[in-house]
Image (cartoon, helix red, strand yellow):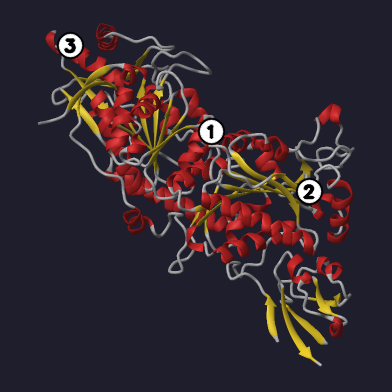
C-alpha cells in the first residue's frame, strides 16, 4: 500500500498543548506542510504571539521569534527588512492582532511589509480563560461578558480583515476556516499564496482563519465546529476579500 | 473496474479524542474507542475498516497529526 | 589626515551608526533627538552600507523592530527621548529576557509626563534600575561630549554583543543639541551574513539549516525551576559586566578633599566648578561615571576614605546620589545639588553649594 498522507517532517515530536479539537493544531500543520512543500525550512522565520499559540515554536521546526503581546508585525517588519531573502510570517490570535496589536498590524499592512500574517480568529481569549475578544459576536457569552456581549457596553465585533484590505500595502486578504476537509484544503492554498507573496515581495498578505475554541465556547469539539458554521460564518464571511494581486508600487 | 482500498494508522498516544475526524469520514469508518490512552483520552479507531478508501479526509482535519493514510488500487 | 566634523550630538549618533556597521535603525520622532532619524534619512545609508532605516509608527513599534532585528544577529538600534523610552520599557525587558543585543539612545528631556523639551537627567533611575519589569540590567553609557555620542555607538554595540544584553546610551538634550568637533577616526563595515552565522549560529534566527536545532528567541519559560536558572545565568553575566566594564573619568582627584560626582552634561559644568575651586585654592576634584551601570561603586568607596565629603550634581531631584550614598556607606557626608524641569546650574552655583557643604 502507498502512504498517501503523513505528518509533515517539519512538525516536531512534541505533543501540542492545545485542547482537543483546537483549530491551532490544524493550522500549525498547514503552515508546516506549506513550508516543507516550498522547501523553505532554512529560509523561514516565524514570529509567534502572546496567546494560546505563544508556543508555536515548540511544534514547527523552523527558527522562531517570540514577540511581545501584539507586536509580532513590528518584529516581523524588521526581520524581513534586514533579511529580505527570507520568508517571514507572523502567527497571531484575535487578542494579539486585533486588540493590543492593532497599531502594529495596521501600520505593517500600510507600509506593505513583505510578510505573511496568519490571523487565527476564534472570537475569544483562549489562554487567559475565555474572556471577550474584539471579535466576540454580539450576544456571545464570555468570562468578561457573562450575560452576552452587548454593543452598548462592549462595542461591536469588528472585521479587521476587511479593514486592512483597504490599505494599499496589502496585496492579499482572505478569510478561511479549517473545520472540514474541503476547508482545510482551501486554507492551505491560501497560506501557500501568502508565503509565495512574501518571497516574491508583493506586499503584505493577510490570511484570517475563523477558528473554534471549544473550551472557551464551552462546547464539544464537534459542536464547536457546528456552532462556528452557524454563528461565526454569517458574520465573518469566508472567501477572498482582496485578490492576490501585487500592490501598486 | 478498479477497487480502491485504504487504511489508516493512528498515533494513539498523540490522539486527544476530539472526534473531528469521525465526522469528516465520508464512509463512516471511524469511531472513538471505549478504552483511553495514557493521557486518559479515548482515541480514534477504524470501526468499519473495510469501507476505508484512503481519501485522507480524517488525516487532513486532524489537529494533532495523529493519522497516517495508506491506499491501494486493486485492479479486478 | 583625520576626518573632523562640526556636528550636533544627535547627528554624531546617526553618523556613528552608519560608520559602526549598524544594520538597522528604527525610531520615532521626539524632541530633542529627532535629528538622529532626520540625519539618517538625509544620508540614505541603505544606498551605501545597506543599513536599514525606518520611521516606525510609535516607540512601541520601534523597540519591537529592534527586538526582531536583534534576534537575527544584526546590529540594530533606536533612539528616543524620555517619554518615548517609557513606552519602550516593555520591549527592553523582553530584549533583556531573550538575551538580545542592541543599542538604545535616550536623549533625555525633563519629566514627569510630557514634561518639557528642555534637557534633564531625570531618567537615571529608569536607565540603571531597569525600566521594564523583571530582574535585569542594561549597560548604561553616559556621554559628556559630542565625540562620545559618536564613539559610544561603537562601544555600545561592542558591549551589547560581548554580553548579549541591551545597552543604553543615556545622553540629554544639552549634548544631543550642541555642536562640537568630532574626530571620525573609527569606522567599520557591517557584518556579512557569513560573519553573523559564525558568531551567532547558536541563537540568531536566520533560518534553520539541517545542521543545527532550531533557534528560538524568547523570554518565556513556564517551568519555574528552569526560569530561575535562566535568571541566575543572567545575574552571573551581570556580575561579569560589573567586574569588567566599569568606566569613569577623574579630574584633580589625587589630593581632593571634596569630590563632585556628576555624569554627562553635568560633568562638563562640574569640571568648570572644579577649575573655579582650584583657582581659589580649594582641593576639589571630579569623578565622572562613564558607565552608570555598572557603577563605579568601588572607586567611590575608596575615595570615601580620602575625601571629607561628596557633592552629587545632577539635573534631577536626586537619583544617582542614592548610589553614591550606598557606596560611601555613611562614612562622610554626601549631598545632592540639582535643578529640574529643564533648568541648568552654572559652575558658580555648584561651587557655592559645595562651599555651603564644607562650611556646614
Closest to the camera, between mark 1 and mark 3, is 1
**Apparent side of residue C158 relative to residue C341 in the rendered image (left or right):** left
Label 1 and label 2 in one chain? no
**How far apart are the two marked residues, 1 and 3, measured between alpha carbons?**
46 Å
Q: Quadrant of the N terminus of chain C?
A: top left
Please give the name of the residue rendered at 80% of the width and 84% of the height, measured from the top-left corner. Answer: B4
Q: Quadrant of the C terminus of chain C?
A: top left
**How far apart are the two marked residues, 1 and 2, measured between alpha carbons?**
33 Å
Q: Which chain hosts label 2?
A: A
Q: Are marks 1 and 3 in contact (CB under 8 Å)?
A: no
Residue C60 has which mark?
1
Q: Which chain hosts label 3?
A: C
In front: A161, or C5?
A161
Residue that sits furthest to the left in the current view: C1
What residue sits right under mark 2 in the picture? A238
In front: C237, or A138?
A138
**How far apart are the two marked residues, 2 and 3, measured between alpha carbons?**
78 Å
Percent across and percent down for residue A19 are: 75, 59
Residue C277 has which mark?
3
- At numbered mark 1, what does the secondary structure look like: helix, strand or loop? helix
Percent across and percent down for residue C42 are: 36, 26
Percent across and percent down for residue C178 are: 29, 16
Number of marks in the rendered image: 3
Closest to the camera, between mark 2 and mark 3, is 2
Amino acid at each position: 500500500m502507498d502512504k498517501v498522507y503523513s505528518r509533515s517532517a517539519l512538525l516536531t515530536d512534541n505533543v501540542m498543548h492545545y485542547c482537543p479539537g483546537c483549530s491551532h493544531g490544524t493550522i500549525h500543520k498547514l503552515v508546516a506542510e506549506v513550508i516543507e512543500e516550498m522547501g523553505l525550512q532554512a529560509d523561514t522565520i516565524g514570529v509567534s504571539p502572546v496567546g494560546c499559540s505563544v508556543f508555536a515554536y515548540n511544534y514547527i521546526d523552523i527558527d522562531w521569534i517570540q514577540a511581545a503581546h501584539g507586536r509580532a508585525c513590528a518584529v516581523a517588519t524588521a526581520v524581513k527588512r534586514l533579511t529580505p531573502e527570507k520568508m517571514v510570517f507572523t502567527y497571531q490570535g484575535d487578542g494579539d492582532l486585533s486588540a493590543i496589536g492593532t497599531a502594529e498590524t495596521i501600520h505593517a499592512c500600510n507600509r506593505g511589509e513583505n510578510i505573511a500574517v496568519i490571523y487565527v480568529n476564534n472570537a475569544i481569549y483562549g489562554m487567559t480563560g475565555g474572556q471577550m475578544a474584539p471579535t466576540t459576536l454580539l450576544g456571545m457569552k464570555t468570562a468578561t461578558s457573562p450575560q452576552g456581549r452587548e454593543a452598548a457596553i462592549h462595542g461591536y465585533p469588528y472585521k479587521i480583515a476587511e479593514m486592512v484590505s483597504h490599505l494599499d500595502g496589502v496585496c492579499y486578504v482572505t478569510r478561511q476556516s479549517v473545520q472540514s476537509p474541503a476547508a482545510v484544503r482551501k486554507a492551505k492554498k491560501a497560506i501557500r499564496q501568502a508565503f509565495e507573496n512574501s518571497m516574491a515581495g508583493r506586499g503584505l498578505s493577510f490570511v484570517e482563519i475563523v477558528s473554534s475554541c471549544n473550551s472557551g465556547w464551552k462546547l464539544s469539539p464537534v459542536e464547536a465546529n457546528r456552532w462556528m458554521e452557524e454563528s461565526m460564518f454569517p458574520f465573518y464571511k469566508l472567501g477572498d476579500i482582496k485578490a492576490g494581486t501585487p500592490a501598486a508600487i | 473496474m478498479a477497487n480502491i482500498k485504504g487504511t489508516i494508522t493512528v498515533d494513539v498516544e498523540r490522539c486527544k479524542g476530539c472526534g473531528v475526524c469521525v465526522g469528516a469520514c465520508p464512509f463512516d469508518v471511524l469511531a472513538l474507542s471505549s478504552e483511553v490512552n495514557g493521557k486518559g483520552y479515548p482515541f480514534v479507531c477504524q470501526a468499519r475498516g473495510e469501507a476505508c478508501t484512503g481519501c485522507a479526509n480524517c488525516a487532513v482535519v486532524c489537529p494533532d497529526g495523529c493519522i497516517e493514510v495508506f491506499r491501494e488500487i486493486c485492479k479486478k | 589626515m583625520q576626518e573632523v566634523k562640526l556636528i550636533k550630538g544627535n547627528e554624531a549618533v546617526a553618523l556613528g551608526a552608519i560608520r559602526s556597521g549598524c544594520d538597522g535603525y528604527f525610531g520615532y520622532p521626539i524632541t530633542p533627538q529627532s535629528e538622529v532619524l532626520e540625519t539618517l534619512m538625509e544620508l540614505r545609508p541603505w544606498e551605501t552600507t545597506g543599513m536599514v532605516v525606518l520611521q516606525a509608527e510609535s516607540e512601541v513599534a520601534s523597540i519591537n523592530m529592534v527586538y526582531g532585528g536583534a534576534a537575527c544577529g544584526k546590529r540594530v538600534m533606536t533612539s528616543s527621548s524620555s517619554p518615548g523610552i517609557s513606552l519602550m520599557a516593555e520591549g527592553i525587558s523582553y530584549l533583556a529576557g531573550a538575551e538580545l543585543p542592541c543599542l538604545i539612545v535616550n536623549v533625555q528631556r525633563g519629566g514627569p509626563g510630557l514634561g518639557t523639551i528642555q534637557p534633564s537627567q531625570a531618567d537615571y533611575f529608569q536607565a540603571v534600575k531597569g525600566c521594564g519589569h523583571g530582574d535585569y540590567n542594561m549597560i548604561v553609557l553616559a556621554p559628556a561630549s559630542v565625540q562620545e555620542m559618536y564613539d559610544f555607538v561603537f562601544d555600545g554595540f561592542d558591549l551589547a554583543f560581548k554580553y548579549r544584553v541591551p545597552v543604553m546610551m543615556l545622553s540629554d538634550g544639552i549634548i544631543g543639541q550642541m555642536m562640537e568637533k568630532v574626530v571620525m577616526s573609527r569606522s567599520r563595515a557591517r557584518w556579512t551574513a557569513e560573519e553573523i552565522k559564525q558568531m551567532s549560529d547558536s541563537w540568531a534566527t536566520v533560518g534553520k539549516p539541517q545542521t543545527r536545532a532550531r533557534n528560538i528567541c524568547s523570554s518565556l519559560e513556564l517551568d519555574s525551576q528552569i526560569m530561575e536558572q535562566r535568571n541566575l545565568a543572567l545575574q552571573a553575566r551581570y556580575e561579569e559586566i560589573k567586574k569588567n566594564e566599569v568606566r569613569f573619568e577623574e579630574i584633580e582627584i589625587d589630593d581632593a578633599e571634596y569630590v563632585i560626582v556628576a555624569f554627562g552634561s553635568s560633568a562638563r559644568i562640574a569640571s568648570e566648578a572644579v577649575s573655579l575651586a582650584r583657582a581659589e585654592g580649594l582641593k576639589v576634584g571630579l569623578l565622572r561615571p562613564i558607565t552608570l551601570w555598572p557603577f563605579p561603586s568601588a572607586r567611590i568607596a575608596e575615595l570615601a576614605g580620602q575625601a571629607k565629603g561628596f557633592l552629587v550634581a545632577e539635573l534631577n531631584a536626586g537619583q544617582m546620589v542614592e548610589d553614591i550614598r550606598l557606596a560611601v556607606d555613611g562614612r562622610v557626608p554626601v549631598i545632592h545639588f540639582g535643578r529640574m524641569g529643564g533648568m541648568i546650574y552654572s559652575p558658580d552655583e555648584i561651587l557655592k553649594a559645595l562651599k555651603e557643604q564644607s562650611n556646614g
